[in-house]
Amino acid sequence: MSKRLLLTISGGILLALVVGLAAIFGSEGQNHEYQPQNEFKLDPWISIHIGSLDLSINKAVLYLFLATALTVGAMDYIAVRMVDKPNNVQTAVESIYNLT
């Protein structure tokens, strides 16, 4: 039996199994509770309005604070370990810093 015939038979069996399971169990319907677009909605956790300026704390602000903390922590950790003759990590970090 050739590989092509074996793959065709295996694919046909798999397709028949998927179609059979779909026919037996059917569809439970749509899930109207989960709306993925709501993941991008920025509901304010702490509302701060100064005139027409909205400085509310929300999910995006939290992500910015976390990214800043991780970046400062990594740079501080590497800065403490700096040596006179730079190793590969120090050179890479300095290059990234210069690019930014």
Image: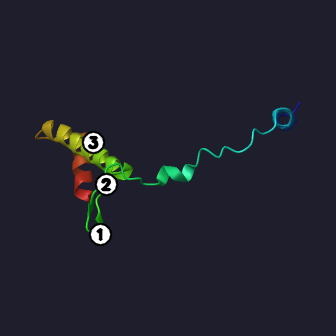
Cα–Cα gap, marks 3 and 2: 25 Å
Q: Look at label 3 and name its amino acid.
A: Leu
- Residue at 61% x, 44% y is 33
Nearer to the camera, 1 or 12: 12
Q: Marks 2 and 1: in contact by CB < 8 Å?
A: no
- Residue at 26% x, 58% y is 100
> What is the crowding at mark 3: few (fewer than 14 residues within 10 Å), some, or many (at least 20)?
few
Q: Marks 3 and 1: in contact by CB < 8 Å?
A: no
Q: Look at label 2 and name its amino acid.
A: Ser
Instruction: In the rendered view, tell whether residue 64 sits above or below residue 11.
Output: below
- Residue at 49% x, 49% y is 39
> What is the crowding at mark 1: few (fewer than 14 residues within 10 Å), some, or many (at least 20)?
few
Q: Is residue 59 left or right of residue 68?
A: right
Residue 58 is situated, as x and y percent measured from the top left of the image, at 35, 51
- The secondary structure type at the circle numbered 1 is loop
Nearer to the camera, 64 or 54: 54
Cα–Cα gap, marks 1 and 3: 32 Å
- The secondary structure type at the circle numbered 3 is helix
Nearer to the camera, 8 or 74: 74
Q: Look at label 1 and name its amino acid.
A: Ser
Res 49 → quadrant: bottom left
Provide the residue designation for mark 3.
70
Q: Marks 2 and 3: in contact by CB < 8 Å?
A: no
Q: Earlier in the sequence, mark 1 or mark 2?
A: 2
Number of numbered discs on residues: 3
**Image disc number at residue 47:** 2
Q: Earlier in the sequence, mark 1 or mark 3?
A: 1
Residue 97 is situated, as x and y percent measured from the top left of the image, at 23, 53
Residue 41 is situated, as x and y percent measured from the top left of the image, at 46, 54
**Image disc number at residue 52:** 1
